Amino acid sequence: MENQDINEENINKQEENTTPNENNSGENVTVEPTAEELLAQEKDRYVRLYAEFENYKKRTSKEKMEFFQYANQDMMISMLGVLDDFERALKEIAKNGNSADLQGVELIYQKFKGKLNEKGLKAMEVKPGDSFNVDFHEAITQIPAPTEDLKGKIVDVIETGYTLNDKVIRFAKVVTGN
């Protein structure tokens, strides 16, 4: 079927290139394209086909890289709960436990967090007083702003947001001032 399409294109191109001319006797005579014109047409077709193939290779290569970059996204999202639990445990041990327990859990937490960071996971840096941005933050609730300068800004961070290779995989849950 592809060959048939190519043959039809060649016939159409040849018909376009053959122009009727009238000779002195009034008869229509068709002028066949020269070998140079046919060569130029085929060369043009080849160059366009080559460019199209190069674009295809670039596009598929880019799609492949994106696939590998975000292939472990589901696994990373599931690990965020474990990371949150570690942070809560560290806070509780710091309040009630001894320093040796705290140091051991903190060591495991840092190692776990480091491995996730190696795979492209990054915590968003969100602090009270930052401007609210819907691209990175999810407003849980609004409270009356404690000060005038916190109106429309972040008052408290409830849950840390994360990005995976510059793509938001969990929005930071925040409280905004009203």
Image (spheres, rainbow, N blue to C red):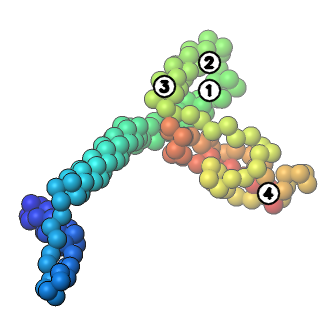
Residue at image point 37% right, 38% down: 65
Q: Do the CB atoms of the residues marked 1 and 3 lie less than 8 Å apart? A: no
Q: Earlier in the sequence, mark 2 or mark 1?
A: 1
Q: Which residue is mark 2?
A: 102
Q: Do the CB atoms of the residues marked 4 and 2 lie less than 8 Å apart? A: no
| Element type where label 2 sits in the image | helix
From the viewer's side, name the closer residue of 14 and 140: 14
Left or right: 25 as drawn, with respect to 125: left
Quadrant of the rendered structure where residue 24 is? bottom left
Which label number is shown at residue 90? Answer: 1
Q: Position of residue 173 (x, y in %)?
A: 63, 49
Q: Quadrant of the N terminus?
A: bottom left
Left or right: 102 as drawn, with respect to 145: left
Q: Amino acid at mark 3?
A: Glu
Q: Which residue is mark 3?
A: 118
In the figure, 166 relative to 154: above or below?
above
Of the two numbered discs 3 and 4 in the rendering, the one whose residue sits closer to the viewer: 3
Label 1 and label 3: CA atoms lie apart by 22 Å
Q: Amino acid at mark 2?
A: Leu
Q: Position of residue 144 (x, y in %)?
A: 83, 59
In the figure, 26 relative to 136: above or below?
below
Q: Which residue is mark 4?
A: 152
Instruction: Answer few, some or many: residues within 10 Å of disc 4's Cα (few below 14, many 20 plus, some between 14 and 19).
Output: some
Q: Residue lying farthest bottom?
A: 26
In the figure, 143 relative to 154: above or below?
below
Q: Earlier in the sequence, mark 3 or mark 4?
A: 3
